Amino acid sequence: MSGHSHSHSHGASTATGAHRRRLVIVLCITLGVMALEVVGALVSGSLALLADAGHMLTDATGIGIALFASWLATRPASPTRTFGWQRAEILAALTNALILGTVAVLAIVEGVSRFRSPDPEIQAGLMIGVAVVGLVANAVGLRLLSAGQAESLNVRGAYLEVLGDLLGSVAVIVAGFFVAVGFPGADGLASVAIGLMILPRAFMLLREVAAVLLESTPAGVDLEKVRTHMEGIPGVVGVHDLHAWTITSGVPVMSAHVVVEEDLLACGGGTEVLQRLKECLGGHFDVDHCTFQIEPPSMQETEESVHH
């Protein structure tokens, strides 16, 4: 005898979807500053400004991917995609991390080359002015994304990218002052610094994406505590095949085989056990979707003999 209990809503919006409007605003700000930095880099001759513009291009691409993925994630589930398109957000975050890493390497390589052969004709004043505008714009973007970055991998990715842009603007401003006092090689050093700031963020995002794709236990979920709570429910003899993983940001799921006393199942108590399991997990653990298989001790013995 078995039973299943589900507590979920596949049509619910994901964590990224809840912050879609702010992502759109940040995307517009990012594209505007990027265009300004490209023009400023071409006119001033600053490689650091161009590197920061390239970083902003990856930011804009990443945010655009995140928005598209969050739209896909709201599409309803189907018999062939039982969780809908929610995992698309994680694939978007993966793409974002790879783009970030590529831009970082290019900024470092070109920065080293510029440092070895500096351009003495860089217009430091224009370089600083454009970077200050970028600094202010990125500060606004950070403020808009600060709330959502703790809830969604894609929003967090966008937040980290904008933070990197802000730091990149600071690096360009500092380099501009050094260029103004006669050290043009600072432009190349700033480009290297921007690349080095991007690399750790790309790695962090990639590590978080890998945890989701490898179906690791969600952060903050202690499966032994979950097992202890479940086994504390009257009538529950044991819990095995307990698994917890994440479909996408903000959508943790769990499944388990729950062994219940034979007599309790015989008198129809399985439904009550399922209800108590649902209340237990809902009250102590943040899990959206739970699936339980209720089985008697004899079935567990059968399963163990098959496995051995």
Image (tube, rainbow, N blue to C red):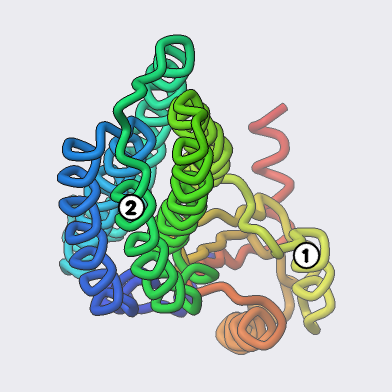
Mark 2 belongs to which amino acid? Arg
Q: Which mark identifies residue 227?
A: 1
Relative horizontal placement of residue 82, taking residue 148 as reference (left or right): left
* Residue at the farthest front position: 181
Question: Could you say where residue 85 lies in the image, as x and y percent from the top left?
Answer: 23, 57
Tell which circle, 1 or 2, labels the residue nearer the N-terminal end.
2
The quadrant the N terminus occupies is bottom right
Q: CA distance from mark 1 to mark 2?
A: 27 Å
Q: Nearer the viewer, mark 1 or mark 2?
A: 2
Q: Nearer the viewer, residue 81 or 129?
A: 129
> In the image, what residue type sits under mark 1?
Arg
Residue 265 sits above or below residue 122 on the image: below
- Choose between 153 and 284: the one closer to the eye: 153
Label disc, if present, on residue 11 of the rendered structure: none
Which residue is found at the position 45% from the left and 40% from the top?
180
Residue 261 vertical placement versus 126 (above, below): below
Q: Residues within 10 Å of mark 1 (few under 14, many from 20)?
A: some
At 34% from the left and 71% from the top, the residue drawn is 14
Query: Is residue 299 something one can see in this rendering?
Result: yes
Residue beneath disc 2: 87
For the point 49% across and 31% down, the residue is: 182
